[in-house]
Amino acid sequence: MKKFTLLAILCALFGGQYATAQEATTEKAGEKSREVTYVEDPSQGYLFNKLKDNWFVTGEVGAGFYMSPNDSERNFLDRFSPAASIYIGKWFSPSLGARLGINWLQSKGLSSTPYSGGGLEMEKQPINGSFYRQKFSEIGPVFDLMLNVTNALFGYEPKRPYNLVAYLGGGGYWTYAKVYDEISTAEGGTYYDKDGWKFTHDRVITFRAGIINSYNVSDQVQLSLDLRYSGIDNHKDEPGEGWNKTAHDIQAYVGVTYLFNKREWNAPIVPVCPEPEELRVRLQTADARVADLEQCIEEPEQKAPLATIYYPKNVFKITKKDVKLLTAVAEVMKNNPSKVYLLTGWADNYTGNTNINTRLRNNRVDGVKKQLVKLGVPEYQLRSTINHTNLVDLGEKYQALGRAVTIEEL
């Protein structure tokens, strides 16, 4: 943070006032002008958005499979029921979001008695001699906290066609069920007549978790496959009885999501300072002299580096694969305690700017050194530096080979 503040002060001395995209100030000294630019820097992360941005609405339909204690006695294919949801939600960052909505689902099961607490009635003609069919609908508000796993693990990419979203939430349902009225006949018998769907005054709570497979159709529209588990309070089998164990419901939905403006995310804006003209000329002259001296010195035979760690663009974190390689390198170093090794940080000069590339070089070499020390290599065996040239100077086509840390024996 201190480095960023000092950089901003230095830019103010050279340049002046803030600009969102780019702003120039003219210095009337020797008829020279200097330009300070302000650019978004994704390596600094992404900003949380305003309250009005990144809202969405989702509608989905699907099917559920209800599992309460006696349901295994019911025909397997007769246990699937329709379900639907509608939500409005907001993403607060590329990875974190929330949604609030209404969920409706129908459940089919079996009960050991023909009545259920709270007024819920079931078909009074038992199957298998012991169980009574249940079929009831539940509807109510639900709320989910959402994590875009793809953005969290691999970074934000607005053109990525697929994203995996995980969520966790809960809610409550009101229950409606089909009621069967008992009718007496003139002969003294009885039969049962369906009296339609009625509110049973039964209220239950639910907790839920799931994953959403989201596919971008356009900048505004996404298609999704939502796979969900719900734990639901099971209904009483008869009045006065306590709650049964939690019932389970597995659901799958297909949905459509519409994204409102604004849909994308912004990185922090950082100043990029120009090099003073006099210093640039002096550096170029010094580089030329160093090059001349190097040509006059007979260089020893070049050894290949002990190891090279490569990085993607704008990245300095070490992967699990790199840790495995560094573990092998650390064993070599610890087996040769008298030897010293040079770690050099590189970044290609075809992308970014001087300030960003210098920061990447330092962060890359510092990360490798810390990992080697963590693996047991004594610090006295390690030297670290950065190099402002290209590691592989074969043209812009091979720029990816210049983003690296080399490890050499001194």
Image (cartoon, rainbow, N blue to C red):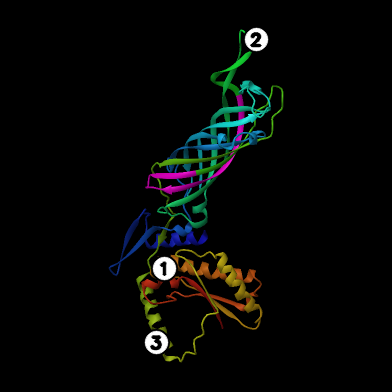
Give above or below for 15 relative to 375.
Answer: above
Q: CA distance from mark 3 to mark 1?
A: 24 Å
Q: Would you name the residue on which mark 1 appears?
A: 354
Disc 2 residue type? Gly
Q: Quadrant of residue 244?
A: top right
Query: Is mark 3 in CB contact (under 8 Å) with mark 1?
Result: no
Over which residues does the magenta segment extend? Answer: 202-225
Q: Would you name the residue on which mark 3 appears?
A: 292
Q: Residue at x 68, y 25 (%)?
A: 113
Q: Quadrant of residue 286?
A: bottom left
Looking at the rendering, in which quadrant would you find the C terminus? bottom right
Q: CA distance from mark 1 to mark 2?
A: 97 Å
Q: Is residue 205 magenta?
A: yes
Outermost residue, left direction? 31
- Percent x, y of residue 111: 66, 28
Outermost residue, top direction? 186
SS class, disc 3: helix
Nearest to the observer: residue 253 or residue 218? 253
Using residue 277 as the reference point, say whether residue 154 is left or right of it. Answer: right
- Percent x, y of residue 241: 72, 25
- Percent x, y of residue 225: 48, 44
Q: Residue at x 66, y 80 (%)?
A: 335
Q: Would you name the residue on which mark 2 appears?
A: 188
SS class, disc 2: loop
Query: Is mark 2 in CB contact (under 8 Å) with mark 3?
Result: no
Q: Nearer the viewer, mark 1 or mark 2?
A: 2
Disc 1 residue type? Thr
- Give whichever of discs 3 and 1 has the lower sequence position: 3
Using residue 82 as the reference point, say whether residue 265 is left or right of it. Answer: left
- Give whichever of discs 1 and 2 has the lower sequence position: 2
